Image: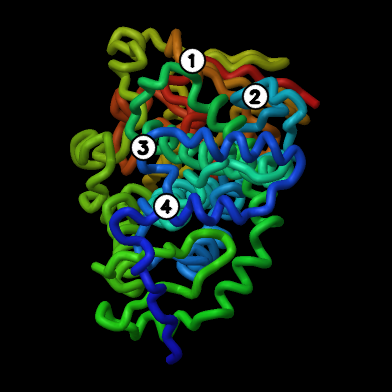
Amino acid sequence: MARSTVVDDGAAGDGAPDDGAAREEQAAYGFPAPLWRTLARLRPPGPLTRSSTWRSPLRGPWLTSVFASVLLVGLPIVIITGLLSYVAYQPQLGQGIPSDVHGLRLPLFAWPTSPVWLYRLNQGLHVALGLALIPVVLAKLWSVVPKLFSWPPARSLAQLLERLSLALLVGSILFELVTGVMDIQYDYSFGFSFYTAHYFGAWVFIAAFVSHVALKLPTMLRSLRGRRLRDELRTPLSETRPEPSDEHGLVPTDPAAPTMSRRGLLALVGGGSLAVTAVSLGQTVGDRLRPTALLSSRGQSYGDGPTDFQVNRTAAAAGITPADAAASWRLKVQGPSPLELDRAALLALPQHTVQLPIACVEGWSTEQTWTGVRLRDLVAMAGVRDVSTGVVTSLEKRGTFARAVLNRGQLTDSDALLALKVNGVDLSMDHGYPARVIVPALPGVHNTKWVQSLDLTGA
C-alpha cells in the first residue's frame, strides 16, 4: 500500500510564524475582501483558532468521510423514526405535542394496529440507534474541529453561509442528543417542554443536515475512494502516516507523532457504540435482557411475580390512591346507550386474552399477556354503530396523558382491550388497576391506566 509521507516540520520550530497565518496571507478573499482581511487581523486570543494547535496526524478528509458515511446511513433512520413517533400520537385527533407546529406539518394518517410490534420497533430503533451514534457524532466533530475554529470564520459570503449551516448542524445535533438522553433519564432540568423543543429542534437539524450533505457528498465520495478501508485496518501504529495535504485544512501542516493508529481510533469509536448499545438495548428487546439495561433510569424491579415489569408512571406519582380504585369505582361508557359497569360486571362479560407489547417513547418496551373486555364489545353495548373516535379518561387528575383519543381502527381491533388482568392476575395499582387500555401498536402513554370513562363518537 502506498503511504503518504510526513510533511517536513522543520519550518515550524521555535520562532517560526504560525502556519495558519501564512496560509491566510496567501488566501484569496471574496467580496467584501476588506471585511475578511480585518477579521483575519482580529484573531481572538488563545490557541483554539491557530491551526498549529490541532496536530493529530490522524485527521484528514478520509477519516472524516468514514465517520460521515456511517452518519449518512444512521441519521436518516433516526430522523424518520422520530417523525413517525409524532405521527403515532395522532395529532389529527388533537393530541400532537406540540399541537401548533407553525407550518411544519407531516403527512398524517390513522396510526395502524398491525403489526402489533410497529411502535415497539419504531421507538426502539429511534432510541437505540440514536444512542449508538453518539460516539460516531463525537468522533466526527473531533475530526473536523480545526475547521470549526478556523480564522477568519469566512473568506466570502458563500463560505459564510456554509459556516452558518455548519453551526446550525453542530448545534442542533448536540441539542437533540443531549435533550434526548436527558429525557430517557427523566431529567428535565432544562426547564422547557421536551416534546416541543425536540420537534422543532429536529426540523432545524433536518434542514442543516440536508444542506450539509448536498454540499459535502462529492467531497466525501472522493475522499473515500482515495484510500481503502481494508488497507487502513491492516496498518499498525508504526506505519501510520498523515493523509496528503488537503484544501480543507483538516490535515495538519506540522503533525505530531501518532499515538494511535487509524484502525485503533475506528475500533475505539466502534467499540464505544457497541458498549452503549449493550448497556441500553436490554430495555427494548425483551424482559429477559432487562438486567443488562444498566443505563435504565427506572431500576430493575417494578412489582411482584406476574406484575414485575416496566412501569412508566406509578400510581403514587399519578396521585392515585386505593380509595380511587375501591369497590365504588364504575366505568362510564358514553354513547347512544350509556353504560356504567363495575369491575364485577366487566369480569362477567366475555373475556379475551392476548399477548401484546407496551412501548414507550423513551425506548423501553415490555410484552405481557393481558385479559379483559374487547373495546369493540363496549362500543357495541353503548349502541355506537359506526364508531369514529373514543376519548379515554383516567382517574388521574393531572398529567399530560391523563386523557387519550383512539381512532376507529384502534377501537375496533379484535385485540384492543380494556384490560382487567395481566399474566393471569389482577392488575396492580401501578399497572392501572382497576382497568386500563391495551391497544396493539399504540404509544405506551396512550394505553391509559386507571380508566374512568370511555366517551364514544359515531362517524
Residue that mark 3 sits on: 46
Seen at 44% across and 43% down, the residue is 49
N-terminal of the two: label 2 or label 3? Answer: 3
Q: Position of residue 169 (x, y in %)?
A: 57, 43
Counting residues from the N terminus, which is met first, the one under dot 4 or under dot 3?
Answer: 4
Residue 379 visible in the picture: yes
Residue on which the image places disc 1: 452
Q: Position of residue 309 (x, y in %)?
A: 29, 40
Q: Disc 4 to disc 1, how far (Cα)?
A: 72 Å
Q: Decide: marks 2, 3 in contact (CB < 8 A)?
A: no
Q: Considering the numbered disc 2 on the image, is that residue within a helix, a strand or a loop? A: strand
Pointer 2 and pointer 4: residues touching (CB < 8 Å)? Answer: no
Between 366 and 50, the one lying in front of the other is 50
User: How far apart in space, not on screen, are marks 1 and 3 (Cα)?
Assistant: 63 Å
Q: Is disc 4 placed on a helix, strand or loop?
A: loop
Q: Residues within 10 Å of mark 3 (few under 14, many from 20)?
A: few
